[in-house]
C-alpha cells in the first residue's frame, strides 16, 4: 500500500475499511506502507523537491529490503501499487512468494502529472499498472470500465465499488431555521473540480442564502461565493457532512475523471443528503437522475437544480431518503463485505488445492 494509515482517502475506503471485517472472518492483516511519516509530511507540499527525492529514495530502499528479506503471508494484497515510484520490482518479488490480489481503484494507467510534485511524477511509471494486472492472481476493480480494461491483461477480475459503513455514516437531524448549506468534501488534489462551480454558486447566492461548506485539508477561496472551511479529519467528517443540506460533486472534463468512482458521492448519499453531481465517471451508475439525486452538465443545470433544492425542504428530504436507501442496498459494508472476503478465501483455497493443505490466512497489503 502506498501511504501511511488514515491519510489517503482511497486507501481508507478500500483496504483500511476492509481490514477489520477481514479480521472478523479469520484473516490477519499486516500493513506495509511504502511512505514513511517523514515522506508523507512533504509529499503534497509544493516545492521541497530535494527533500521529497531523498525521502522517496529512503522509502523505496526500505520497502525493497523488506520484500527481499521475505515475509510469511498467504496472500499479498497490493492497493494501487506497492511502491510510489519505480517499475513493478517489489511486486514481482512478492508474487514469487504468495498469490497476489491487486486492487485498482483509479485509472493509474493514464499518465498523470501531480500539481505538487512536477517532474517527480515521471518516476511513477504509469506502464507499471499493466504489469501489475498481468502478474496478479486476481484483480479487484472499482468499477466496470476499469474492470474491462483489466480484462485485457488478466482473465480473473472482480468489480467491487467503494463501500460505506452505514452505521457510521448516518443522517442527522437539522435544527429548525437552519439555512441550507451546500457541502463539498475533497483533497488538495481535487480543488480544481470545485473551482469550476464558481459562476453557478455565485449566481445562486445572489438570490438565496446557501453557504458552501468546504471539508478539506486547506481552505479554498471562490470569488463571490460565501464559504465555510471545515478542516478534514476522520473524527469530524461524518458530522460535518450530515449537518449540511445538499451535497455537490463538481468535476472537470478530464480523461482521468471519466474512469473514476467518486466516493464523495456515496459519502453524501449515505448521510441522507440529496446530491447534485456532474454526469461523468461512476456518477450515472450510482445516481438515478431526479430519483436519488441529480445529474447535471451545464452551469445552467447546476444553478437550477441547486436552487430547487435550496427552496424546497420536502424535495431535499425525499431525494435524500432515496439516496440513503440506495447506499444501504448497493454499497453498504454489511451487504457487500462477504463478497470481498470470498475473494480472499478463494485465493487460499486455490493455493491449498495446489499444495495439498490449507494454510493459515494472512495477508500483507
Image (spheres, rainbow, N blue to C red):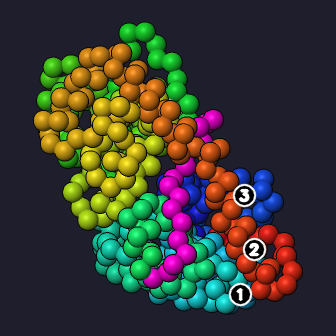
Task: Identify the mark at residue 280; answer none if there is no mark.
Answer: none
What residue is disc 2 on?
348
- Give the residues drawn in magenta, as a range: 153-168
Mark 3 in CB contact with mark 1 (< 8 angstroms): no
What residue is disc 1 on?
97
The CA distance from mark 3 to mark 1 is 21 Å
The CA distance from mark 1 to mark 2 is 13 Å
Pinpoint residue 353: horizontal percent, then vertical percent: 79, 81
What residue is disc 3 on?
22
Residue pictured at 21% horizontal, 19% vertical: 208
The CA distance from mark 3 to mark 2 is 13 Å
Q: Earlier in the sequence, mark 3 or mark 2?
A: 3
Pinpoint residue 212: horizontal percent, then vertical percent: 31, 31
Q: Secondary structure at mark 1?
A: loop
In this view, the residue farthest toward the top is 176
Q: Earlier in the sequence, mark 3 or mark 1?
A: 3
Q: Secondary structure at mark 3?
A: helix
Q: Earlier in the sequence, mark 1 or mark 2?
A: 1
Is 101 situated above or below 273?
below
Mark 3 in CB contact with mark 2 (< 8 angstroms): no
Query: Quick check: is 271 in the magenta stretch?
Result: no
Residue 347 left/right relative to 161: right
The local crowd at label 1, few if under 14, some if 14 to 19, many if 20 or more residues have their Cα within 10 Å, is some
Pinpoint residue 62: horizontal percent, then vertical percent: 62, 82
Between tags 3 and 2, which lies in front?
2
In this view, the residue farthest toward the right is 357
Q: Secondary structure at mark 2?
A: helix
Residue 297 left/right relative to 132: left
Q: Which quarter of the image is occupied by the N terminus? A: bottom right
**Residue 288 visible in the snapshot:** yes
Judging depth in this view, the residue of 293 and 119 nearest the camera is 293
Amino acid at each position: 500500500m502506498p501511504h501511511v494509515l488514515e491519510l489517503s482517502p482511497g486507501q481508507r475506503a478500500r483496504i483500511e475499511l476492509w481490514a477489520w471485517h477481514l479480521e472478523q472472518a479469520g484473516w490477519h492483516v499486516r500493513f506495509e506502507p511504502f511512505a514513511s511519516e517523514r515522506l508523507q509530511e512533504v509529499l503534497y507540499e509544493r516545492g521541497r523537491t530535494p527533500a521529497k527525492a531523498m525521502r522517496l529514495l529512503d522509502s523505496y530502499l526500505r520497502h525493497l529490503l523488506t520484500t527481499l528479506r521475505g515475509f510469511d503471508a498467504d496472500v499479498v494484497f497490493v492497493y494501487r501499487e506497492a511502491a510510489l515510484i519505480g517499475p513493478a520490482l517489489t511486486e514481482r518479488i512478492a508474487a514469487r512468494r504468495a498469490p497476489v490480489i491487486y486492487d485498482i481503484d483509479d485509472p493509474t494507467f493514464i499518465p498523470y502529472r501531480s500539481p505538487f510534485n512536477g517532474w517527480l511524477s515521471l518516476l511513477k511509471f504509469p506502464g507499471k499498472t499493466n504489469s501489475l494486472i498481468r502478474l496478479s492472481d486476481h484483480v479487484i476493480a472499482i468499477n466496470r470500465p476499469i474492470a474491462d480494461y483489466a480484462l485485457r491483461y488478466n482473465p480473473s477480475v472482480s468489480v467491487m465499488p467503494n463501500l460505506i459503513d452505514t452505521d457510521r455514516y448516518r443522517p442527522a437531524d437539522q435544527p429548525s431555521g437552519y439555512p441550507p448549506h451546500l457541502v463539498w468534501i475533497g483533497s488538495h488534489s481535487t480543488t480544481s473540480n470545485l473551482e469550476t462551480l464558481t459562476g453557478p454558486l455565485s449566481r445562486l447566492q445572489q438570490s438565496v442564502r446557501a453557504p458552501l461548506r468546504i471539508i478539506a485539508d486547506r481552505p479554498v477561496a471562490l470569488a463571490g461565493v460565501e464559504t465555510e472551511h471545515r478542516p478534514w479529519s476522520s473524527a469530524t467528517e461524518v458530522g460535518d457532512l450530515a449537518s449540511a443540506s445538499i451535497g455537490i460533486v463538481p468535476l472537470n472534463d478530464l480523461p482521468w475523471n471519466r474512469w473514476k468512482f467518486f466516493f464523495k458521492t456515496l459519502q453524501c448519499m449515505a448521510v441522507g443528503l440529496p446530491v447534485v453531481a456532474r454526469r461523468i465517471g461512476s456518477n450515472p451508475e450510482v445516481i438515478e437522475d431526479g430519483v436519488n439525486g441529480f445529474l447535471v452538465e451545464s452551469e445552467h443545470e447546476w444553478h437550477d437544480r441547486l436552487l430547487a433544492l435550496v427552496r424546497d425542504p420536502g424535495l431535499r428530504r425525499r431525494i435524500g431518503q432515496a439516496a440513503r436507501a440506495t447506499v444501504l442496498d448497493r454499497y453498504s459494508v454489511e451487504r457487500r463485505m462477504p463478497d470481498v472476503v470470498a475473494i480472499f478465501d478463494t485465493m487460499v483455497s486455490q493455493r491449498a488445492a495446489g499444495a495439498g493443505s490449507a494454510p493459515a490466512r494472512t495477508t500483507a497489503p
